[in-house]
Image (cartoon, grey):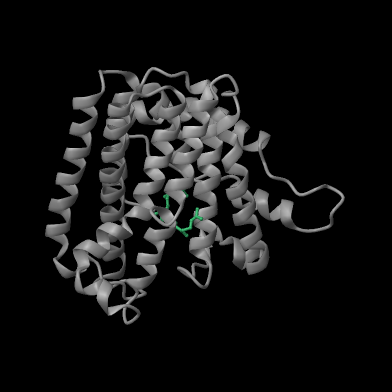
């Protein structure tokens, strides 16, 4: 498990994560897409390796918070929260592959393909992704219209208009691969942020939809998620800038490089302020709202 510092500033956030983590872990275990036991492959071992002990589990926490923010019961949303972590895990597995970001490490251990080979990594990525879709129907058999809407939400966010499309921009931004994308860096970067924003949106709105959120509430969550994704990506670029000095190891051009660190910090500040304002303006005061405000600050100001 990734260790987290427990500063006073984020006390409600850490308390919430600690409180909710056991339920999330149990829902992941209960819904693991295991291969049939009599089949001799390393699939199940690789699946276990990819999911446990896992990372911060922020995205399933977002699902529970999205539900609570609009008055829902988070306990009913645990299968949906597990679905969101499955989707996140599959995106990390695919992102680490040699044909994508080519990362040999993930969560302080060898990446899945490094340990089990590319073939099995692709299969586990597909296995967990596929396991996610039906989970929005669990606990919502009595209100199938909400589950259908949540299902549509995850299909849209994963697809070409979301994570898949955003990742394709990320690939194009690798230097020398696509001149057109780097000509308008601002546009390319905002589309690239889709890969992060779309998952934030999916995580928050899936919980909110299942809890019966109104159209206005869902629209506010979409805008909040977009800003959260932008802030996360900006802080990621700033961290890379700090670690690598002037350039990323893969020479990916970004606004943090082109316009400099202080400009990026200024934009990050504005983005998180706007995100928090959307929460405060659209949702009544509640524990979930306080936790989300702290999570916004943490994601933008994290140093790892
Ligand atoms: C088919 C689901 C799917 C995706 C295909 C590969 C891809 C398209 C998208 C990649 C999206 C991606 C990996 C974005 C990076 C997001 C990011 C910085 C993740 C790290 O998040 P943390 O720090 O991770 O919250 P932990 O380890 O805590 O879970």
Q: Residue at x 14, y 65 (%)?
A: 260
Front position in the image: 35 or 144:
144
In the rendered image, the vertical position of residue 100 relative to residue 34, given as above or below: below
Residue 171, image quadrant: bottom left
- The reply to whether residue 299 is visible in this rendering is yes
What residue is rendered at 87% in x and 50% in y?
38
- Position of residue 115 relative to residue 82, above or below, is below
Residue 176 image position (x, y, % from top left): 32, 82
Residue furthest to the front in view is 145
Above or below, 234 against 270 in this view is below
Q: Is residue 143 above or below residue 34?
A: above
Q: Is residue 108 visible?
A: no
Residue 298: percent from left, percent from top: 30, 40
The residue at 28%/34% (across/down) is 219
Point out residue 67 in the picture as x, y percentages from the top left corner: 42, 25
Give coordinates of residue 266: x percent, y percent. 12, 52
Q: Is residue 254 left or right of residue 33?
A: left
Left or right, 151 with reference to 6 = right
Residue at figure coordinates x 27%, y 72% from the top left: 181
């Amino acid at each position: 498990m990734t260790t987290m510092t427990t500063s006073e500033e984020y006390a409600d956030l850490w308390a919430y994560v600690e409180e909710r983590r056991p339920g999330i872990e149990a829902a992941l275990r209960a819904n693991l897409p295991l291969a049939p036991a009599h089949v001799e492959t390393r699939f199940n071992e690789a699946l276990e390796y990819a999911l446990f002990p896992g990372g911060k589990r922020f995205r399933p926490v977002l699902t529970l918070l999205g539900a609570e923010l609009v008055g829902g019961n988070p306990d009913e949303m645990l299968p949906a929260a597990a679905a969101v972590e499955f989707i996140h895990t599959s995106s990390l597995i695919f992102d680490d592959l040699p044909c994508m970001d080519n990362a040999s490490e993930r969560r302080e251990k060898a990446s899945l393909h490094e340990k089990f080979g590319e073939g099995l990594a692709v299969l586990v990525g597909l296995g967990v992704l596929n396991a996610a879709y039906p989970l929005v129907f669990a606990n919502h058999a009595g209100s199938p219209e909400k589950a259908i809407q949540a299902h549509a939400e995850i299909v849209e966010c994963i697809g070409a208009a979301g994570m898949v499309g955003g990742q394709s921009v990320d690939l194009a931004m690798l230097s020398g691969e696509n001149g057109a994308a780097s000509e308008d860096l601002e546009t390319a970067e905002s589309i690239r942020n889709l890969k992060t924003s779309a998952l934030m949106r999916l995580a928050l709105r899936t919980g909110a939809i299942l809890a019966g959120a109104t159209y206005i509430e869902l629209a506010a969550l979409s805008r909040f998620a977009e800003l959260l994704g932008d802030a996360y990506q900006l802080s990621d670029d700033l961290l890379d800038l700090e670690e690598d000095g002037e350039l990323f190891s893969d020479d990916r051009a970004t606004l943090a490089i082109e316009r400099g660190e202080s400009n990026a910090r200024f934009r990050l500040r504005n983005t998180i302020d706007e995100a928090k304002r959307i929460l405060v303006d659209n949702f009544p005061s509640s524990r979930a709202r306080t936790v989300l405000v702290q999570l916004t600050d943490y994601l933008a100001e994290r140093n790892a």
